[in-house]
Amino acid sequence: MADGARLRWAAWLAAGVAMPVSALAQDTDPPVIDDQQPADDRPSAEQANALGEQGRASENAVRAASDGFGVSVGRETIGIYSTAEVRGFSPTRAGNIRIEGLYFDQVWGLTSRIRRSTTIRVGLSAFGFDFPAPTGIVDYSFRKPGDSASLAALVDINSFGAAGAEVDVSLPLIQDKLALGVGAGVYRNAFYNATDSFQHIEAVSLRITPSDRIEIIPFWARSDLYGDEAGPIYIPAGDFRPPRVPRRRYFGPDWARYRGVAINYGAFGRADLGDDWELRGGLFRSLFDDTRAFTNLIFDLTPQGEGAQLILADPPTKLASTSGEVRLSKVFAEAQRTHRITVSLRGRDRGQVFDGAARIDLGPVRIGEVLNPPRPGFAFGPQANDSVRQWFAGVAYQGQWQSVGELTLGLSYSDYRKRVDQPVFGTVSTRSTPLLYNLGVAITAIDNLAIYVSHTRGLEESGVAPAFALNRNEALPAIITRQSEAGLRYQISPDVRLVAGVFDLRKPYFDLDVDNVFRALGDVRNRGIELSLSGKVTGNLSIALGGVLLDPRVTGDGVRLGRLGRRPVGTPRERIDVNLDWRLPFLPGVSVDTGISHSGRLPATIDNAVFIEARTLVSLGGRYAFDLDGTPATFRVSMSNVFDVRGFDLRGPGAYDIFDGRLVSAYLTVDL
């Protein structure tokens, strides 16, 4: 079932984070000082086209990628990192989400009806952010309405039985002053475990430009999800993985179906105040309104496939977060040097309701047999309330010396307050007021080469307790994180670049303890080496290659006493992702692509007694770009997990789900 249906966190925020003017960062927005940003550091015309700026028919993640670390365009996602995992941690759980560089406390991620692309920014690609985050940044690029009328339509199907249709319209209402964007999608979702659902999404946005110095983008998006069955989570009775589970079979009662609404709305914009002053800001609202939600557990599972089944039914819950930021920047230019000072403010007020779940014990079960008892009455218990109020105030400096280097500094103060009201334990309040900072130096004195070193101290979220924990859905406290890194970027040719770096990232370690409570158990340190090679190798061949070698280590009393293993749960030592896109010179409009993704074995329990084995997945695809009566169109077919590799995904320590099987997908996109 959809992971979004399991989120249990919400917030209010009014705020400040800055987008880069750095010569080292790839910004999707025009730089404040155009003549200070080298042309080869901006997206090329071909990259911009592959990002869908000219229409959805040209979307192509491999051609759009500026590195191999992570990018999502339309239906395609590539790279070694994702919104769920960067350098062994989750940037989404940490709260490191940005909309066009502006802070966004996400409950529901931006739908592709208003999101053009997603980029994972680490190392040099995050160097120019005034207030970077240790876990990396998930940067959403917005689908802004254009100055000319356009319509893009897409229909798709796959071998699991899913089907969908999407349409995106851009319509200028007042030339050069006001443009309207409308998007809609309807989907019949179908998944590897035979769960399915129905969903429709609507989105509206405006682009308001009263002058060439002001741009304001208000937007609204909504998703309605119906009948999303709760796929089972398998919890073995001992130190072993679950037995083989049949694919495409649903093990659960028909009535355990999610129903809920997700909404994002808000506005962001910028104003050129003249004399190199710039004002940027945004305010965002993100929420889930869950009518029904279920967790399906098959626990005490034996190697013979016998266990017990438990359904947890949650009472209706509304989760909301308002987030935003405001900042003021000034640029000072002198000969070969420029200086940029940014003052920013951001904050949030997050609230959630948890607990109160009804327990429906279905009794003994055997894998392969389906229990489908009548729908019971749900006796919900009292609920707890969790709220977080937090604000940041900071100042940042960026200095550039043309053909010499760059210096970036940031200092911010945070006031973090959390309150938990529980029926049994009463009210507990905590407060933290840390001083946060970042500093970095880059040397660009050698042609085609940039070398950098940086250090960041940040305050990040630690997420929520998983559904199978005793304190399920409880929001965990914010934590201090530290990251030191160094690396280089070498422009091998005008179209091919190499990026390499080393990093040391440290955080408190949260996981299940022996009492099944999800809490801090020690500290974790992830050291690693990462590499990226990307660009057009030849006129017809593009590559996006990424790799990371990681040395993750857990420390603390739990390790010394033997209760914890030395490796954190769910973190592999190595990950490699290679993607190629080849335009066939003898068949105009036809291209083929392939992806090879390798992930090393990873610990599945906190004592490291059980591991999920390493796996390598292969995908194949092809697309045909053609004119449909003068209209650009693309037909794409792809196959993931070509060799139908089997195994398990980890849902938490000692908790498993089956891994996707082979999937064939096809879609047709038309730009009008």
Image (cartoon, rainbow, N blue to C red):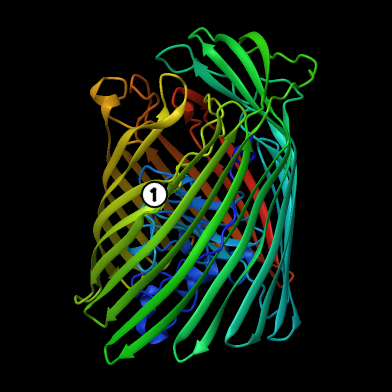
Q: Is residue 42 visible?
A: no
Vertical side of 534 occupied by 197: above or below: above
Nearest the eye: 422 or 2: 422
Q: Secondary structure at mark 1?
A: strand
Q: Position of residue 461 (x, y in %)?
A: 46, 46
485 over 211 or under it: above or below: above
- 24 relative to 199 in the view: left or right: left
Q: Quadrant of the N terminus?
A: top right
- Quarter holding the C terminus is bottom right
Residue linked to disc 1: 578
In-front residue for pair 521/60: 521
Residue 189 spot, x, y in % from top left: 70, 40
Numbered marks: total: 1
Q: Which quarter of the figure has residue 182?
A: bottom right
Give the farthest residue toward the left: 446
Furthest residue toward front: 426
Q: Residue at x 29, y 42 (%)?
A: 526
**Could you tell me which residue is drawn at 37 percent across and 42 percent down?**
88
- Give the residue drawn at x 31%, y 62%: 438
Please, what is the three-letter code of the amino acid marked with disc 1?
A: Val
Query: Looking at the image, can residue 317 be seen?
Result: yes
Which quadrant of the figure has residue 227? top right
